[in-house]
Image (cartoon, coloured by chain):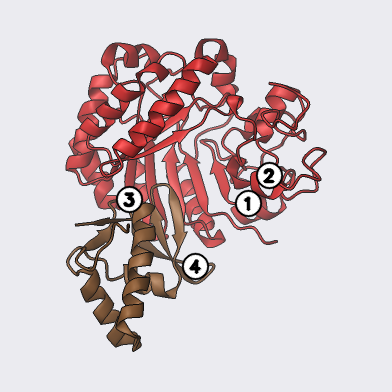
Chain colours: A red, B brown
């Protein structure tokens, strides 16, 4: 078996004070209790032994776990690069210092927009001003700050303002990610999906801003793939580089894989991570090329895009083994 | 035109860190969004990027340590650092 995982996404809780319409939590929560501190520590050790080099601590809102600094310290001791992906609600100076001391390498704070009224409306909570304060606290604690804003119909026209806002926070990196339509975002897509014209304009502005801010801030613009003609190389291929362990210990080849019906996920409470990675049905299912049908099977792009995204194929065609319908070669138009 | 000159003082970008990949036994440069594999020479160069030494000083040190011709080495060092700079893995002052 040639594949090894490089990155672990640890979704340490599903709890979150925000209620964004594109929430990355699963639309159907799996049953079970959150993994305990010692269970996470074991997962981290097993991940490091498999070759994982990076751990992203995400959720839900990971700051809701009182043991977060403990888990981060453990990951650092295991030799992992640690990244906290957070709304930042709950990040005060004491907590930021504690996380820095634990060895946290980087923090990414999400914003919903650049101004409070819209941002709070999207988040469904009064959060924006608190986030600005938390971003400052993170920087003062010496944590390298990234920001991300999920783009959709209600904020995509404000790209220039959003870029200026991220720069004012002292972020070294700004990720502008168009909504990917899975889970909650798929259910709420009617209110989120931007028009083709909005997407076109935003793309131009993003390129201009990226060039303009080059020295100060790294801007990543993640394309809305509904409007692309080739699929994204989702996860860099199924079961090739990434694994996600969710709040209750289910282990997924991709964070949204629970949207694929019939796929059974193994749990770290019952199995070792090594077994799950190399032997489990869910990780084997779409690994490599054997599962591919036409047009993927004979396509020269298959080694580059791996047939696109299995979750998207499921949601839009009803069958995860179909070509991602974003692809212009697919006969199914999304 | 390269963003790196012999007088530049390169340092690791905030959030970037060198680590050994246990599986491959190779040094890697880790950053918020990526894993950059470092070959032997890239590792030798970047390990000296402390924000204090200039590119020229780094080149001279490497030339001595590995008994390599200075001019060739300078070019290699600048090419390597320019690539890392383009990827935002180092900052220069």
Same chain for labels 3 and 4? Say yes or no: no
Quadrant location of residue A294? Answer: top right
Residue at the extreme bottom: B67
Seen in the picture, residue A20 relative to A253 is either above or below; the reply is above
Marks 1 and 4: same chain?
Answer: no
In the picture, measured across the screen, residue A143 lies left or right of residue A22, that is left
**Residue that label 4 marks:** B22
Counting residues from the N terminus, which is met first, the one under dot 1 or under dot 2?
A: 1
Mark 2 surroundings within 10 Å by alpha-carbon count, few (fewer than 14), some (14 through 19), many (20 or more): many
* Residue underneath mark 2: A306
- Find residue A159 and report its horizontal and vertical position in percent: 36, 23
Which chain does the residue under circle 2 lie in? A
User: Which residue sits at x=68%, y=21%?
Assistant: A334
Q: Dot 4: few (<14), some (14–19), or many (≥20) neighbours within 10 Å?
A: some
- Find the distance from the CA under tag 3 to the CA under tag 2: 31 Å
Residue ID for mark 3 = A105
Mark 1 surroundings: few (<14), some (14-19) or many (≥20) residues within 10 A: many
């Amino acid at each position: 078996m040639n594949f090894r995982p490089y990155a672990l996404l640890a979704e340490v809780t599903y709890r979150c004070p925000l209620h964004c319409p594109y929430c990355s939590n699963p639309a159907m929560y799996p049953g079970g209790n959150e993994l305990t501190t010692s269970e996470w520590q074991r997962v981290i050790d097993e991940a490091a032994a498999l070759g994982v080099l990076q751990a992203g601590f995400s959720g839900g809102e990971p700051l809701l776990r009182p043991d977060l600094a403990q888990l981060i310290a453990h990951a650092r001791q295991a030799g992992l690069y640690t990244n906290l992906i957070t709304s930042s609600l709950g990040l005060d100076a004491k907590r930021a210092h504690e996380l820095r001391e634990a060895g946290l390498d980087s923090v990414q704070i999400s914003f919903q927009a650049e101004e409070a009224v819209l941002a709070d409306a999207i988040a469904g909570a009064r959060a924006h001003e608190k986030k600005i304060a938390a971003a400052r606290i993170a920087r003062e604690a010496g944590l390298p700050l990234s920001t991300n804003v999920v783009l959709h119909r209600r904020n995509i026209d404000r790209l220039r303002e959003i870029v200026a806002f991220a720069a004012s926070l002292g972020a070294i990196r700004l990720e502008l990610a168009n909504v990917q339509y899975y889970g909650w975002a798929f259910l709420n897509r009617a209110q989120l999906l931007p028009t083709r014209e909005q997407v076109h304009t935003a793309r131009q502005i993003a390129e201009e801003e990226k060039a303009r801010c080059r020295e100060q801030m790294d801007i990543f613009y993640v394309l809305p793939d509904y409007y692309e003609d080739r699929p994204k190389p989702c996860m860099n291929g199924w079961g090739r580089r990434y694994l996600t362990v969710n709040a209750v210990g289910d282990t997924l080849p991709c964070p949204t894989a629970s949207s694929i019906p019939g796929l059974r996920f193994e749990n770290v409470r019952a199995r070792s991570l090594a077994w799950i990675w190399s032997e489990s049905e869910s990780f084997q299912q779409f690994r490599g090329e054997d599962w591919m049908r036409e047009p993927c099977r004979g396509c020269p792009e298959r080694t580059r895009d791996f047939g696109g995204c299995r979750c998207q194929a499921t949601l839009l065609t009803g069958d995860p083994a179909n070509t991602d319908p974003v692809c212009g070669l697919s006969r199914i138009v999304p | 035109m390269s963003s790196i000159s012999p007088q530049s003082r390169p340092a690791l970008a905030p959030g970037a860190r060198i680590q050994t990949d246990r599986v491959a036994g190779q040094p890697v440069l880790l950053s918020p969004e990526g894993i950059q594999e470092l070959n032997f020479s890239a590792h030798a160069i970047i390990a000296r990027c402390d924000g204090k030494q200039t590119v020229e000083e780094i080149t001279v040190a490497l030339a001595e340590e590995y008994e390599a011709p200075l001019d060739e080495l300078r070019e290699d060092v600048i090419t390597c650092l320019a690539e890392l700079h383009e990827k935002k893995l180092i900052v220069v002052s």
